[in-house]
Amino acid sequence: MTRELGNTLGVAVVGSVFASLYVAELSGAAARTLPGAAVAHAKDSIGAALVTSHALAQHGATVEADGLREVATIGFLNGLHAGCLVVAGVCVAGAVFCGLVLPSQPRAMPTGNLGLAQATESA
């Protein structure tokens, strides 16, 4: 249960960081020179952006196609970079937590209660 919750929250957090940066890039100044319908489709995903770019190029709008592809690629890579930094930060925090909280040596076994060990040896 704990692992499932951690995975779900991790995907949600990293996905939110990624998506917000991707959409922000497609809403920025560089995207304002592109056709509005193409940018709207591109905001769905990088795949949609590349398909839309290809369609623009087939209709002769090569400058707009190249611009859309470039803006979408930059947004995708910026989102990916930020998402990786978030994951790296969580890993560092986890390592620091483990280093500070977890014991470096196993705890000594109590020697006073050997009844179970003696019973299994004599059997």
Image (cartoon, grey):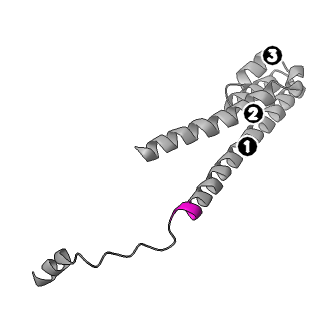
The structure residue drawn at horizontal position 79% and vertical position 27%, both measured from the top left corner, is 26
The residue stretch that appears in magenta:
98-102
Q: Residues within 10 Å of mark 3 (few under 14, many from 20)?
A: few
**What residue does disc 1 label?**
82
Mark 1 → mark 3, Cα distance in angstroms: 26 Å
- Residues marked 2 and 3 touching at CB (< 8 Å): no
Left/right placement of residue 110 relative to residue 91 reads: left
- Residues marked 2 and 1 touching at CB (< 8 Å): yes
Quarter occupied by residue 41: top right
- The amino acid on which the numbered mark 1 sits, given as a three-letter code, is Ala
Comes first in the chain, label 1 or label 3:
3
Left/right placement of residue 43 relative to residue 56 reads: left
Indicate the secondary structure of the residue bearing disc 3: helix
**What residue does disc 3 label?**
36
**What residue does disc 2 label?**
21
Q: Main secondary structure of the magenta part?
A: helix
